[in-house]
Image (cartoon, rainbow, N blue to C red):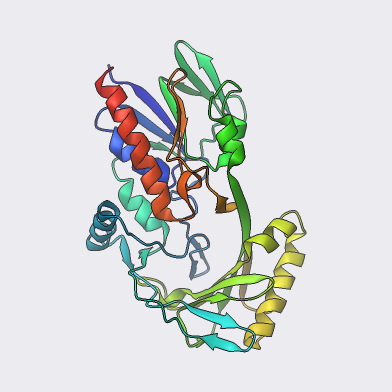
Amino acid sequence: MKTSIAIIGAGIAGITLARALAPSADVTIFEKSRGLGGRMANRRREGFSFDHGAQYFTARSPAFKATAESAAADGHAGIWPKSVHTLKADGLVSDTRPPEPRYVGTPGMSAFAHGLAEGLHIRKEAMVAAIVAADAGWALSDNEGQDLGRFDLVISTAPAPQTARLMPENFSGHAALEAAEMSGCFTLMIGLREPLDLGVEAARIEDDVLSWIAVEASKPGRPAKTALTIHSRNDWAEANLERDRDAVKTEMLQSLNRLLGRDFSTAPWLDLHRWRYANVEKPIGQPYLFDASLGLGACGDWCLGNRVEAAVESAQALSQLLSQRLQGA
């Protein structure tokens, strides 16, 4: 009988881990939302499309380059943007760094995760709220106390603060989890009826409030309707996480008006998303956490750094350890 493994979170780390372990174990991914990909997210509203989380990813290791190129060949990824300029109060500064391939999911950022997740057993809208020792394994339940099943091993790929709250007190990784530092972000989504030429596909922003702007229609496979995705600074978001959403939206729009000389407050579509854990400020500096005596572990970008590839590398490292354990079972 195969070892049963529960993986919490269907972001890139959870999907990567499940893909590696599925041939030799009975793996179930639990995802609290309706979609896959975690912060590699896409939102569609009234004909507009927004990648409201991660904007692109790079692939530097040979293994992840092969994964990205395979996804592109299968139609799940494309190259974007050609360059990332910097928008300042006094104008645009061109990107002079050496070119590096950047990838996005197609036709939305989450498509990359969906492609990797094909064939995996994923339970969506299933939020794991408790992990309790039971029958030489672990019983999972949701926030309403409903039983989600019993498993030999449980791995959390949720952000470090959420993993810390979820893991039992005797989990050996708590000190490391507490050492991780993550920050939030607000994403402002603007949909327009008329075309808009900003002169760039995307730009970093030097501002007290904003940090990023992207023209969604410039990405491969996106609708032609004019859609802008704007990110706040992480430190500004941290200081305003519990602030009234309309006030946050207003201040972000005011900053955008100062930078571009245009008022978007009456745009046909305006939406705001809050990411409580968007950025890894301080990783724990080790590829994963695993308590062999309990059969509990954790991995994610917060282990190694603030990149999609860091989440992949963390999951791959843990999968190697677990594969060895499964072979010896």
User: Measuring 56% from the left and 71% from the top, which residue is drawn there?
Assistant: 212
Q: Residue at x 42, y 61 (%)?
A: 109
The residue lying at 58 percent from left, 30 percent from top is: 174
Quarter of the image with the N terminus in it = top left
Vertical comparison of 159 with 1: above or below: below
107 is higher (above) or lower (below) than 263: above
From this view, report whether residue 214 is shown above or below residue 275: below
Does residue 283 appear left or right of residue 36 in this picture? right
Where does the image place residue 206, in percent across and percent down from the top left?
61, 76
Foreground of the two, 181 or 237: 181
Q: Residue furthest front?
A: 285
In the rendered structure, the answer to whether residue 87 lies left or right of residue 8 reads: right
Residue 208: x %, y % from top left: 69, 72
Q: From this viewpoint, is residue 265 visible?
A: no
Q: Can you tell which quarter of the image residue 68 is in?
A: bottom left
Return the x and y of residue 293 as percentages of the image width and height. Answer: 45, 17
- Compared to 73, does 166 lie above or below? above
- Please say whether residue 258 is visible from this viewpoint: yes
Query: How many numbered discs sit on the rendered protein?
Result: 0
Residue 145 placed where, x, y %? 60, 24
Quadrant of the image containing the C terminus? top left
Residue at the far top in the pictured view: 135
